[in-house]
Image (cartoon, rainbow, N blue to C red):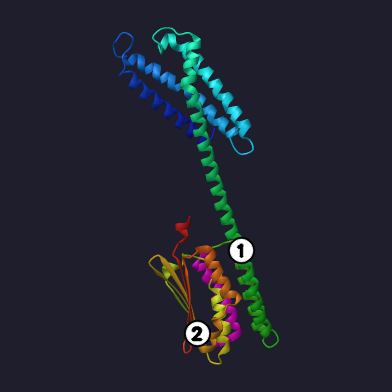
């Protein structure tokens, strides 16, 4: 017997116990055939045993409602089954009262069975159908909750599938750009190309380890970003300078995997790589109350700002992933300055790994 069934049995027992106590209290306010109040020694056993006799019958009706619910397509059959069950209950209650009356004295004088049966019809027919209605209300309520649970599960699975599709779109995009970078060096600087391949291998290995994960620690995200920047530093040399401004308390915060990489890639390709003089990319992370603020800023000037304002795969996918994970509880800002480059700022809920456990 599972916990749900035990709870239901307990509720039924409590209900009929309270019903019996209420009936006993009413009886003790009444007078018997001798003109005296009904003593509690008579009222209590008669009312409690009468009420407890309903416990198995009630559980039977609840079970029957689950097996034969009155639903479209099965109305006639289900109504007939419940009508037969209630008829049986009327007879069972009559036999129950008739058999125990000599000891419990529900009647002032020994009754005939026909009299008890007629009284059982009056007392139990309506009550039986009322219980059938209550059983169906419970049944339909449980079914509605189950459908809501399944709908929530399907919605969650749909969101996971959408995020996985976005990630599968982002990863080939990054890989294509990284391979292009390697191709630029392979004929003029084989050693540099070799270092880039090693770095790319480490990055892809780490990315595959996180496949199917919707959020990782910021520390892990920055480690992967470091692999990518090592690749680009090999290609660009002293033209690429990186500054990290990461608050220590943010390292364990949750972030989507590879959320910063397309932003940095955008800054490198459209900002730093267009310059003949050294340029800088700054990666920042800080906490503002219950929010995590992530920033990627480049010193690319007008070229970087104009290019990064587009809607390429990297930025568009980042927006879509943030919306899929956080709904409207995030912000994505792209601030342009022709003289100082472009700043991309992400703001998401601040959650640490231990808070999600």
State which region is magenta. Answer: 216-242
Q: How many marks?
A: 2
Q: Earlier in the sequence, mark 1 or mark 2?
A: 1
**Residue 230 shown left or right of residue 346 in the figure:** right
Q: Secondary structure at mark 2?
A: strand
Between residue 352 and residue 336, name the one nearer to us. 336
Tell whether position 220 is magenta. Answer: yes
- State the separation of the CA atoms marked 1 and 2: 32 Å
Q: Compared to 217, does 102 lie above or below?
A: above
Which residue has dot 1 on it? 164
User: In the rendered image, which quarter contains the N terminus?
Assistant: top right
Outermost residue toward the right in this view: 187
**Quarter of image, res 275:** bottom right
Between residue 193 and residue 210, name the one nearer to us. 210
Tell whether position 176 is magenta. Answer: no
Mark 1 against mark 2, which lies toward the viewer? 1
**Residue 159 shown left or right of residue 244 in the figure:** right
Image coords of residue 55 (percent x, y) = 48, 25
Image coords of residue 206 (percent x, y) = 60, 67
Circle 2 crowding by C-alpha within 10 Å: few under 14, some 14–19, many from 20:
many
Between residue 259 and residue 59, name the one nearer to us. 59
Image coords of residue 74 (percent x, y) = 63, 35
Q: Residue at x 57, y 26 (%)?
A: 83
Q: Residue at x 47, y 14 (%)?
A: 97
Q: Residue at x 54, y 52 (%)?
A: 152
Residue 230 visible in the current orientation: yes
Residue 271 visible in the current orientation: no
**Residue 307 shown left or right of residue 356 in the figure:** right
Circle 1 crowding by C-alpha within 10 Å: few under 14, some 14–19, many from 20:
some
Q: Compared to 151, does 31 lie above or below?
A: above
Which residue has dot 2 on it? 280
């Amino acid at each position: 017997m599972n916990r749900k069934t035990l709870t239901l049995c307990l509720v039924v027992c409590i209900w009929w116990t309270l019903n019996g106590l209420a009936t006993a209290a009413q009886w003790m306010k009444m007078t018997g055939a001798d003109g005296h109040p009904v003593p509690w020694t008579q009222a209590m056993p008669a009312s409690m045993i009468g009420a407890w006799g309903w416990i198995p019958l009630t559980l039977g009706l609840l079970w029957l409602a689950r097996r034969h619910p009155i639903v479209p397509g099965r109305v006639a059959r289900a109504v007939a089954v419940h009508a037969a069950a209630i008829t049986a209950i009327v007879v069972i209650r009559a036999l129950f009262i008739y058999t125990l009356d000599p000891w419990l004295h529900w009647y002032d004088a020994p009754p005939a069975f026909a009299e008890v049966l007629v009284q059982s019809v009056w007392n139990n027919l309506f009550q039986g159908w009322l219980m059938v209605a209550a059983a169906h209300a419970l049944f339909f309520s449980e079914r509605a909750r189950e459908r809501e649970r399944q709908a929530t599960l399907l919605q969650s699975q749909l969101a996971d599938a959408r995020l996985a599709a976005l990630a599968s779109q982002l990863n080939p995009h990054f890989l294509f750009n990284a391979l292009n970078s390697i191709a630029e060096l392979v004929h003029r600087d084989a050693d540099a190309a070799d270092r880039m391949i090693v770095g790319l291998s480490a990055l892809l290995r780490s990315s595959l380890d996180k496949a199917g994960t919707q959020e990782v620690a910021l520390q892990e995200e920055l480690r992967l970003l470091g692999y990518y920047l090592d690749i680009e530093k090999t290609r660009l040399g002293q033209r690429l300078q990186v500054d990290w401004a990461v608050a220590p308390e943010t390292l364990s915060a949750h972030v989507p995997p590879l959320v910063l990489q397309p932003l940095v890639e955008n800054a490198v390709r459209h900002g730093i790589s267009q310059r003949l003089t050294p340029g800088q990319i700054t990666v920042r992370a800080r906490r503002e109350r219950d929010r995590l603020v992530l920033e990627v800023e480049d010193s690319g000037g007008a070229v970087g700002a104009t290019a990064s304002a587009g809607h390429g795969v990297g930025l568009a996918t980042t927006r879509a992933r943030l919306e899929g994970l956080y709904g409207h509880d995030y912000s994505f800002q792209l601030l342009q300055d022709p003289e100082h480059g472009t700043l991309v700022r992400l703001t998401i809920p601040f959650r640490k790994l231990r808070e999600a456990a």
